[in-house]
Image (cartoon, helix red, strand yellow):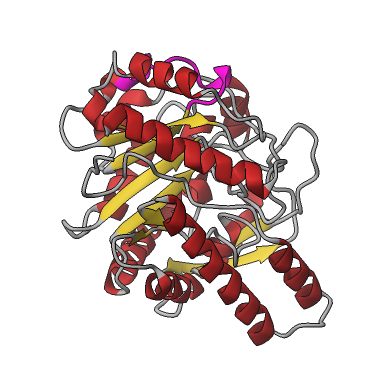
Amino acid sequence: MEQTHTPPFRADAVGSYLRTDAIHEARAQHTAGQLDDEQLRAIEDREIVALIEKQQNIGLEAITDGEYRRAYWHFDFFDGLDGIELGEGPTGMDFQGLAIKPVAVEIVGKLGFPDDHPMLAHYRFLQQNTGAGHLPKMTIPSPTVLHFRLAGDSLVTPLYADRDALFDDLAAAYRGAVAAFYAAGCRYLQFDDTAWAYLCSADELAKAAARGIDIDHIQEAYVTLINDSLRDKPADMVITTHVCRGNFRSSWIASGGYEPVAENLLANCDYDGYFLEYDSERAGGFEPLRFLPHGDKIVVLGLITTKSGALEAVGDVEKRITEAAQFAPLEQLALSPQCGFASTEEGNVLSEDQEWAKMREVIQVAGEVWG
């Protein structure tokens, strides 16, 4: 299979994988006080090493730790930042009525990225156990996610008059994160982002306006926030984003094609690549890809769903890639599943066998299209 030489690769993955039975059991025992932190970490280490080997054996170039150490794709990272505490409260997220554990972010002090953020150690373990010829990939939530979902009563420090007053310190914290992960050896970092997908949804825009967000100018503010976060990125570090419509136990939140945000997202944000969900009619057509600038940026088409175990027909996936190539050059496209398989520790409703069948299909189709 032809490689792009730098990520994102022709066959890639968003990041999270279904937690193994051993992980589920260990975390339950840890919560019950039957395992201490060190015992839990030893089990996570063992399971992550096995996951790394599985990814390498099927032919993936980008290798993640599956987010095995996390309960949530985003809250765990935010909890490690300076100035943030997690409490109980409504998440504001409606997954078709499914109950998600109530977690609320509180801003209690000056935002910052600490030298001992736990995910730096998580990355180092991944890197140490990834074999030659493969590239470890780290995933963290985008700074826009923190701003977009923040409740009005979550600012419990006088340092910030309102949520918009967070922008400068939030960008500085993310510049610190980029620098720290780079120093740890990371060359492939991904900002996972639900905010841009919600800006495509009339329902979510109405909720955002009710929370006090200036929906008429928020896209420009987010372009500035992202670019300020990325402005010191080293030249040999690739930073991509995954635009997610919500992913919890195979349910979702937002509907709407990318047209309302495509120009700002694809042309104005300084990302190197975009993982875009295209597994259902909720994503709309490929026409917004026309805003992708010609050059080095890559759009990774999420054509293979992680929300069910049914395997897509290879011919159908290849046909959709051909359709997408009418609006963006084929050499600037790649393929992945539409989302992670387990954005929270509960995971989506499919089996591990089905999960790996989908990953093998990603590799097969990428080889046939670009190889």
Residue 195 visible, this orientation: yes
**Residue, x 48% and y 70% (percent of image)?**
119
* Region rendered in magenta: 278-289
Name the residue nearer the viewer: 109 or 227. 227
Q: Nearer the viewer, residue 11 or 252?
A: 11
- Does the magenta-highlighted stretch encompass residue 215? no
| Residue 65 in sight here | no
Please state the horizontal and vertical placement of residue 291, each as a whole percent of the image: 27, 22
Residue at the image position 25 percent from the left and 24 percent from the top: 330
**Residue at (32, 39) in percent of width and height:** 10
* 7 lies above or below 35: above
Percent x, y of residue 141: 48, 53
Quadrant where the N terminus is found in the figure: top left
Query: In the shown orientation, is residue 162 left or right of residue 261?
Result: right
Expressed as whole percent of the image width and height from the top left, the position of residue 203 reads 63, 23
Q: Residue at x 56, y 26 (%)?
A: 312
